C-alpha cells in the first residue's frame, strides 16, 4: 500500500478518529482497484461485503426506479467512504455504484473491519462517525429539495466545491451536467435555467468551469428565504 493512499484513507471519517495501530492493521489488508469512467463497482441487489474509500476521482450511488428512471443517491470524491453499514450487516446493496470519472478505490473487506472492532471496540467510533456523516448528508439533501429553489441548490453545490472563503473564485464542475442535475434532484433543463438565474448572483458558467464573483455572497444567497431568492 503506497503511503499517499494511506494518507487519503486516514483523512476519511472512517479512519480519522481510529487509533493508529488499528488503522495500520486494517489498511494493511486493504487493496486498491482502478475503474474506468462508466464502469460498475457493484449492482443493486448484490451482497454487500466491503467498504470503499475514494482515493481519486468520483463515484456515484444510484437506484433504478420501476419506471426505469435513474435516481442519484450520492456522489463521492477523494476521502469519502461508502458501503459501511450494509457491509457490516451482510445485507444486499439497495443501490448501484458506478465510476463517474476515472476512479481509484480502496476496498476493505467488512469481515476484517468487524474482526478489529471485536478486538478493539475503539475502532467502532470511526464507523459511527462515518454513518452519522452519511445520515447528515441525506437529511441535508431532503431539506434542500423541500426548502430551497433550484438556483439555491445549484449555488450550494458550487459553494461545496469551492475552497475559497471570500472574494472571486473558479470552480471546475467535476462531472457532466446530467449527473449534476440528478444529484440535485432536478431535470437537465431545470439545471440550465438555474445556471441562467445565477448570473444575477455573479456566477458565469463556461463549459465545465464556474466563475464566481463573490463566494461569500453566494453562500448568503443559499440561505435566503426561497420566496425572496425566487424574485431576485
Image (cartoon, grey):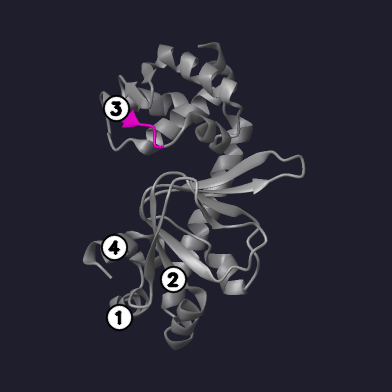
Residue that numbered label 2 is attached to: 108
Callouts 2 and 3 close, C-beta under 8 Å:
no
Find disc 3 in the rendering and name its residue.
Answer: 170
Mark 1 vs mark 2: which is more N-terminal? 1
Give the SS element for disc 1: helix
**Closer-to-camera residue (99/230):** 99
Depicted 70 relative to depicted 18: above or below: above
Q: Which mark is residue 92?
A: none
3 or 1: tag closer to the N-terminus: 1
- Residue 192 in the image: x percent, y percent? 52, 19
Disc 4 and disc 1: Cα gap in Å?
17 Å
Helix, strand or loop for disc 2 = strand
Q: Which mark is residue 21?
A: 1
Q: Is residue 17 left or right of residue 82?
A: left
Residue at the bottom extreme, as displayed: 119
Disc 3 from disc 1: Cα separation: 40 Å
In this rendering, the answer to whether 126 lies above or below 134 is below
Lower sequence index among marks 3 and 4? 4
**Residue, disc 4:** 5
Amino acid at each position: 500500500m503506497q503511503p499517499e493512499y494511506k494518507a487519503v484513507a486516514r483523512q476519511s471519517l472512517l479512519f480519522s478518529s481510529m487509533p493508529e495501530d488499528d488503522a495500520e492493521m486494517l489498511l494493511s489488508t486493504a487493496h486498491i482497484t482502478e475503474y474506468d469512467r462508466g464502469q460498475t463497482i457493484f449492482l443493486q441487489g448484490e451482497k454487500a461485503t466491503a467498504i470503499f474509500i475514494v482515493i481519486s476521482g468520483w463515484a456515484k450511488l444510484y437506484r433504478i426506479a420501476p419506471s426505469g428512471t435513474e435516481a442519484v443517491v450520492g456522489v463521492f470524491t477523494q476521502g469519502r467512504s461508502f458501503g459501511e453499514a450494509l457491509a457490516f450487516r451482510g445485507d444486499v446493496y439497495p443501490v448501484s455504484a458506478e465510476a463517474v470519472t476515472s476512479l481509484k478505490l480502496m476496498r476493505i473487506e467488512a469481515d476484517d473491519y468487524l474482526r478489529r472492532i471485536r478486538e478493539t471496540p475503539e475502532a467502532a467510533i470511526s464507523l459511527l462517525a462515518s454513518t452519522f456523516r452519511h445520515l447528515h448528508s441525506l437529511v441535508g439533501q431532503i431539506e434542500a429539495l423541500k426548502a430551497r429553489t433550484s438556483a439555491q441548490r445549484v449555488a450550494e453545490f458550487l459553494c461545496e466545491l469551492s475552497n475559497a472563503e471570500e472574494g472571486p473564485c473558479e470552480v471546475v464542475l467535476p462531472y457532466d451536467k446530467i449527473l449534476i442535475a440528478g444529484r440535485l434532484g432536478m431535470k437537465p433543463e431545470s439545471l440550465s435555467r438555474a445556471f441562467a438565474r445565477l448570473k444575477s448572483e455573479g456566477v458565469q458558467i463556461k463549459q465545465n468551469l464556474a466563475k464566481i464573483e463573490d463566494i461569500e455572497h453566494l453562500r448568503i444567497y443559499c440561505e435566503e428565504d426561497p420566496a425572496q431568492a425566487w424574485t431576485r
